[in-house]
Structures are given as C-alpha cells and as structure tokens.
Image: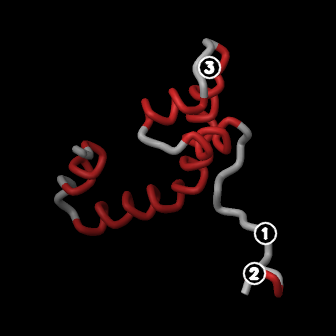
Amino acid sequence: MENPFRERIAAIADPVERAVEIGKVLNGLPEMASDLRELRQAAVLELRAAGWSYGQIGQALGLHRNRVQQIAEGRSGKTRRPATENDA
C-alpha cells in the first residue's frame, strides 16, 4: 500500500527537521488510532443500519464476522480476560 505521508516526511532534506516531524507523528499516533477506530466503528454501524449482516461486512472488509461484531460494539480486541488455573 502506498503511503504518501511517509513519502512527504522522507522528502524533508534537513535531518533535524525530518526527525522533528517524525516525532510529532509518533506522538500523535495513539490519538489518531483512537479516531480511526471510531470512524471504522461508525462505518460498520452504518452498514448494519443498512441491513448488512456481520458476515457480509466481514467478507467486504476481509475480517471474521466475530471481529466485525467486536468493532460494532466498540471493543478493540486488545483486552483479554485474565488467565485462570482452568486455562492451563
């Protein structure tokens, strides 16, 4: 996948300026990721409101239907329940 943002930063001739810009981007990644997750959730909810099933959405997005349901519910998939003795 082409990344014009990367190309724009890589084209900065001055290494100090380039490093400063990279630092700004890295510092903003958590907020950007959060914003993108919200936008993705809204898109999935829009498809659900249009009558799409989780399976149909998953097929269109290349995701498992269970993952699509998690996205619709606002679950990031990063949190897991703590392991118990029975899990061994």
Q: Which mark is residue 87?
A: 2
Q: Indicate the amino acid at tag 3.
A: Glu
Q: Quadrant of residue 38?
A: top right
Q: Secondary structure at mark 1?
A: loop
Real-space Cα distance between discs 2 and 1? 11 Å
Indicate which disc, 1 or 3, sits on the residue closer to the N terminus. Answer: 3
Frontmost of labels 3 and 2 is 2
Q: Indicate the amino acid at tag 2.
A: Asp
Q: Which mark is residue 8?
A: none
Kindly identify which residue carries mark 3: 46
| Tally of numbered discs | 3
Kindly identify which residue carries mark 1: 81
Real-space Cα distance between discs 3 and 2? 37 Å
Q: Quadrant of residue 79?
A: bottom right
Residue in the picture at 61% in, 12% down: 50
Q: Quadrant of the N terminus?
A: top left
